[in-house]
C-alpha cells in the first residue's frame, strides 16, 4: 500500500521522469542494429557456421552473389564488371574476361565453364564481397550494384534477399504500428465504458513500448521479426493490465471518498492480480530463450522485458495519467457494448455436458492437424517475400537461364593433389541434381595452362590452406532433394579430406531445419512445465493447472491445426513461437475465471452458482482482452507482404479468438465436471459449505439417480 500511495502522491514527478526517459529511449531505439539474416542465429559450433567464418578469415570473402545480365554485349558486360569491382566491399568479380581478353573467342573456354556462365541471350557474373551476408556494408553494396547494373541485370543470393527484406520491413513497420494502434483503440472504444480512456491506455503502453525498444540497444542487435512483432505484441498483451486497473479504479471510487485513495487501492489490487498473470506470460517468452536457434532468445528476452516494463508502466504511468485526466474521463463515460452476461452464463452452464463432448471430440482432429502442420512448414526464406520483389525475380532468371536453384561452396585442403581434386569434382558432378562444380582444377586443363591463370582467379579459388569449390545445384534450398544432396556431397568431401566443409544457403538451411525441430520440442516442454508450476503455486492446486493448460493446449492445437486442413503452409518459426506465445498470453483468460470460481466456491456457493457467477463476471474482461489482441494483430496480418510477419500475426489473432471461445464455453464445463477433484486437490478449497455439499451430492435419491 505504501508503494501505491507513493505513486498517487508523486504522479506529476512520475510523468516528468517518464517524459525525460523517452529521450534516451528514442536514441537507443535508433542506434539498435536490426538483423535481417535468419541464418545468423545458427549455433556457432556448427560446421556450416565455422566454414563461413573460415571463408571470411582466410579468403577475405563473406557474401556471394550471381548477377544475370540479359541481352548485353560483351563490351558492356566488361564495363559493368569493372564498375562493380570498384564498389566498396566487393572483393572480386569473376566473368569471362577474368580469364582472358574479351577479344579472344569464348569458345576457347572449357565447355563446362562456357555453358556455366553463358546462354544464348545472357551471361552470368560471380561477385564475392569481403563482408558478411547481412552486414550493413554488404546491403549498401547490393544497392549500389543494382543502381549501376540497371534493369537488364538481376542480382541473386542471400545478400539480395536480406537487402529486399530490410527495404520492405522499413517500408511496412510504421504502418504495422499505426494499424495495431488504430484497431486496438477502436476495439477498446467499443468494449470499454469510456471514449477517452483507450487513448490514455495507448499513451501509457506506448511509453512502455518505447522504453522496451530503447533498452534493446544493450542487446547489441535484434532480429527484424522481433522488431516487427514486439511493439504489436506488447500492446496487445499488456493492454489487459490497463483494463484491470481501470475497472478496479472505478469500483474503488464507488466506496472511497476521494479519487487519490481510490487509485491507491486500485494500484494495490492491480499489482497483486497482475503479478500472477504477467509471470505466466513472461514464463512463456522466457521459454523461447532455451532454443539453440538463437532467434528464440532474441524474441524471448525482448518480449519478457516488454511485459515487465508494461506492468511497471501500468502501476506507475497509467494511474498518474488517469488522475491528471480525471475530469475529462468522468465526462466521457458511455454505456459498454457488452450487456449483462447473467442469462448467457446460466445457459452455458446448463448445457455443460454438450461442451464436454465438444472438448473430447475436437481434441483428436485438432491434434492430428497440429502434428501435420508442424511437418508441412517451409524453411526457404525466399518464400516469405512477395513474387514481385527483385530477389525473387533474379532467382527465377537464374533458374530459367541456367537451371541453378542453389549454390554450395566447399572448402578443402590446399594440400589435396590436383589428381584427387579432379577425381573428387567428378564424383561431385555425378551426384543427382548437381549441375557442375567449379574450382581451379576446372579451369586448368589442356586449353589453359596453369601459368596463364590470372592471379585474381587463383586468389578467389585458393588460399594458403584451402581450395574453394563452387557447386551449383538444380534443387532449391530447404527441399528434401537438396538436403539429401548435401549429405551425399558431404560424404564425398570427407572421403578425400576429413577437414572439408560444405557451406552456403542450402547447407545452413538444412542445419536450421534440424536445429529448430529439436528446439520446438524443448520449448514446448519448458513453456508448459513453467506455466504449470506457476499456476500450481498461484492457485495452490494440482488439478487446476492440468485443466487450464489442457484447455489452452487444445486452443493451440486447433489454431495450428487449421493450416493443415486449409492447405496452408507456414514459415518454420511460426509454430515454435506461436505455441509459446498463445499459451503464455491467453492462459490469463482461464486464470481470471478460475480465480473467481474458487472465490465463489470457497464463499459457500454451490458449484453451479459459483461457475455461473465466475463466467458472467469474467466474460466481459475475457472478450475485451481477446479482442484487443485480435485487433492489434489481425490488421497487420492482412497488410504485411512479408509472410513470416503476416502468418505469425494471423495465428496470434486467430489464437486469441479460439482461446476466448474455449475459455468461455469449455472451461465452465470442465469446472462442473471436475468440481470434486478440484476440491480434493486444491489447498484451502474445502470450506464447510463445500464439505456439506459433497455429502449432499453423494446422497442417492429415492429413484436411485445421483444428483449432479
Image (cartoon, helix red, strand yellow):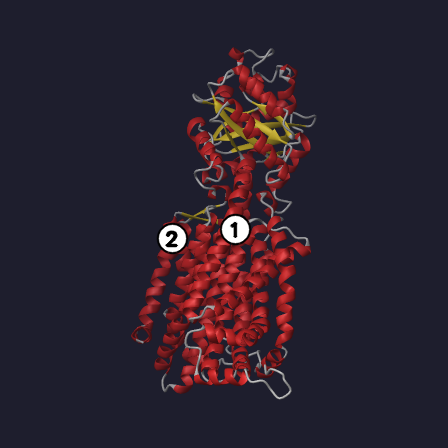
Residue farthest to the bottom, as pictured: 702
Q: Quadrant of residue 67?
A: top right
Task: Assess disc 1: are there few (<14), some (14-19) or many (≥20) residues with their C-alpha within 10 Å of its C-alpha.
Answer: many
Q: Which label's residue is closer to the chain start, 1 or 2?
A: 2
Residue at which label 2 appears: 28
Q: Nearer the viewer, residue 555 or 708?
A: 708
x and y percentages locating residue 301 in the rendered image: 42, 54
Q: Residues within 10 Å of mark 2 (few under 14, many from 20)?
A: many
SS label for mark 2 = helix
Determine whether, in the image, residue 448 is placed left or right of residue 679.
right
Q: Please, is residue 607 above or below residue 585 in the view? A: below
CA gap, disc 1 to disc 2? 32 Å
Q: Which quarter of the picture shows residue 394?
A: top right
Give the mark toward the camera: 1 or 2. 1
Q: Report the front residue among 697 and 55.
A: 697
Residue drawn at (46%, 62%), measured in percent from left and top? 531
Which residue is painted at 35% across and 80% down in the image? 260
Question: Does 699 sit above or below residue 15?
Answer: below
x and y percentages locating residue 151 in the rendered image: 62, 36
Whole-percent x and y of residue 415?
46, 18
What residue appears at the point 49 percent right and 39 percent down from the top-left corner? 140
Give the residue at x 52% y 22%.
Answer: 496
Read off the residue under disc 1.
520
Up the image or down, 82 lies above or below 445; here it is below
Mark 1 secondary-structure assignment: helix
Amino acid at each position: 500500500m505504501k508503494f501505491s500511495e507513493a505513486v498517487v502522491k508523486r504522479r506529476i514527478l512520475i510523468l516528468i521522469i517518464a517524459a525525460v526517459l523517452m529521450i534516451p529511449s528514442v536514441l537507443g531505439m535508433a542506434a539498435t542494429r536490426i538483423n535481417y539474416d535468419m541464418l545468423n542465429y545458427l549455433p556457432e559450433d556448427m560446421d556450416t557456421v565455422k566454414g563461413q567464418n573460415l571463408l571470411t578469415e582466410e579468403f577475405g570473402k563473406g557474401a556471394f552473389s550471381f548477377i544475370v545480365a540479359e541481352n548485353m554485349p560483351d563490351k558492356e558486360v566488361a564495363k559493368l564488371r569493372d564498375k562493380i569491382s570498384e564498389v566498396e566491399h566487393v572483393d572480386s568479380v569473376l566473368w569471362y574476361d577474368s580469364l582472358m581478353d574479351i577479344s579472344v573467342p569464348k569458345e576457347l573456354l572449357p565447355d563446362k565453364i562456357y555453358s556455366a556462365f553463358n546462354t544464348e541471350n545472357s551471361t552470368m557474373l560471380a561477385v564475392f564481397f569481403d563482408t558478411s551476408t547481412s552486414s550493413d556494408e554488404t546491403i549498401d553494396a547490393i544497392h549500389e550494384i543494382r543502381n549501376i547494373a540497371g534493369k537488364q541485370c538481376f542480382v541473386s543470393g542471400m545478400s539480395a534477399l536480406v537487402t529486399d527484406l530490410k527495404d520492405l520491413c522499413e517500408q511496412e513497420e510504421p504502418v504495422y504500428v499505426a494499424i495495431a494502434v488504430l484497431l486496438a483503440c477502436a476495439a477498446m472504444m467499443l468494449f470499454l465504458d469510456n471514449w477517452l480512456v483507450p487513448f490514455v491506455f495507448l499513451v501509457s503502453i506506448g511509453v512502455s513500448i518505447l522504453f522496451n525498444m530503447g533498452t534493446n540497444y544493450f542487446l547489441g542487435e535484434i532480429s527484424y521479426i522481433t522488431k516487427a512483432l514486439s511493439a504489436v505484441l506488447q500492446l496487445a498483451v499488456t493492454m489487459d493490465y490497463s483494463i484491470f486497473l481501470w475497472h478496479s479504479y472505478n469500483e474503488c471510487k464507488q466506496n472511497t471518498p476521494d479519487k487519490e485513495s481510490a487509485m491507491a487501492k486500485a494500484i494495490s489490487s492491480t499489482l497483486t492480480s497482475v503479478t500472477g498473470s504477467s509471470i505466466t506470460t513472461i514464463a512463456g517468452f522466457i521459454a523461447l530463450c532455451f532454443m539453440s536457434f538463437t532467434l528464440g532468445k532474441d524474441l524471448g528476452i525482448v518480449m519478457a522485458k516488454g511485459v515487465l516494463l508494461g506492468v511497471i508502466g501500468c502501476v506507475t504511468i497509467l494511474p498518474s495519467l488517469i488522475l491528471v485526466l480525471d475530469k475529462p474521463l468522468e465526462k466521457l463515460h458511455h454505456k459498454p457494448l457488452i450487456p449483462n452476461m447473467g442469462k448467457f452464463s446460466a445457459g452455458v452452464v446448463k448445457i455443460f455436458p454438450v461442451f464436454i463432448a465438444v472438448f473430447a471430440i475436437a481434441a483428436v482432429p485438432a491434434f492430428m492437424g497440429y502434428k501435420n502442420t508442424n511437418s508441412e512448414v517451409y524453411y526457404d526464406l525466399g518464400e516469405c517475400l512477395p513474387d514481385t520483389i527483385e530477389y525473387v525475380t533474379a532467382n527465377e532468371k537464374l533458374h530459367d537461364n541456367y537451371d541453378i536453384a542453389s549454390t554450395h561452396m566447399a572448402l578443402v585442403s590446399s594440400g589435396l593433389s590436383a589428381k584427387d581434386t579432379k577425381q573428387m569434382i567428378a564424383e561431385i558432378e555425378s551426384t543427382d541434381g548437381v549441375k557442375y562444380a567449379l574450382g581451379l582444377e576446372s579451369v586448368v586443363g589442356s586449353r589453359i595452362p596453369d601459368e596463364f591463370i590470372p592471379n585474381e582467379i587463383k586468389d578467389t579459388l585458393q588460399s594458403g590452406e584451402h581450395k574453394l569449390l563452387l557447386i551449383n545445384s538444380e534443387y532449391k534450398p530447404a527441399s528434401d532433394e537438396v538436403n539429401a544432396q548435401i549429405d551425399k556431397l558431404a560424404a564425398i568431401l570427407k572421403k578425400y579430406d576429413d577437414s572439408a566443409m560444405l557451406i552456403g544457403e542450402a547447407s545452413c538451411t538444412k542445419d536450421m531445419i534440424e536445429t529448430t525441430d529439436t528446439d520446438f520440442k524443448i520449448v514446448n516442454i519448458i513453456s508448459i512445465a513453467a506455466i504449470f508450476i506457476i499456476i500450481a503455486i498461484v492457485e495452490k492446486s494440482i488439478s487446476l493447472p492440468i485443466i487450464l493448460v489442457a484447455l489452452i493446449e487444445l486452443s493451440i492445437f486447433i489454431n495450428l491445426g487449421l493450416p493443415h486442413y486449409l492447405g496452408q503452409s507456414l514459415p518454420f518459426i511460426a509454430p515454435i513461437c506461436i505455441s509459446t506465445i498463445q499459451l503464455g498470453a491467453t492462459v490469463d483468460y482461464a486464470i481470471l475465471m478460475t480465480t473467481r470460481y474458487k472465490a465463489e466456491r470457497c464463499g459457500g456457493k454451490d458449484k453451479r452458482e459459483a461457475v455461473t457467477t465466475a463466467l458472467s463476471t469474467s466474460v466481459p474482461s475475457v472478450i475485451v482482452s481477446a479482442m484487443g489482441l485480435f485487433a492489434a494483430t489481425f490488421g497487420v496480418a492482412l497488410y504485411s507482404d512479408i509472410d513470416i510477419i503476416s502468418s505469425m500475426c494471423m495465428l496470434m489473432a486467430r489464437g486469441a479468438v479460439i482461446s476466448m471461445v474455449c475459455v468461455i464455453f469449455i472451461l465452465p464445463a470442465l469446472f462442473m465436471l471436475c468440481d470434486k477433484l478440484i476440491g480434493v486437490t486444491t489447498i484451502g478449497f474445502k470450506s464447510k459449505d463445500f464439505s456439506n455439499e459433497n455429502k449432499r451430492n453423494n446422497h442417492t435419491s429415492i429413484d436411485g439417480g445421483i444428483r449432479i
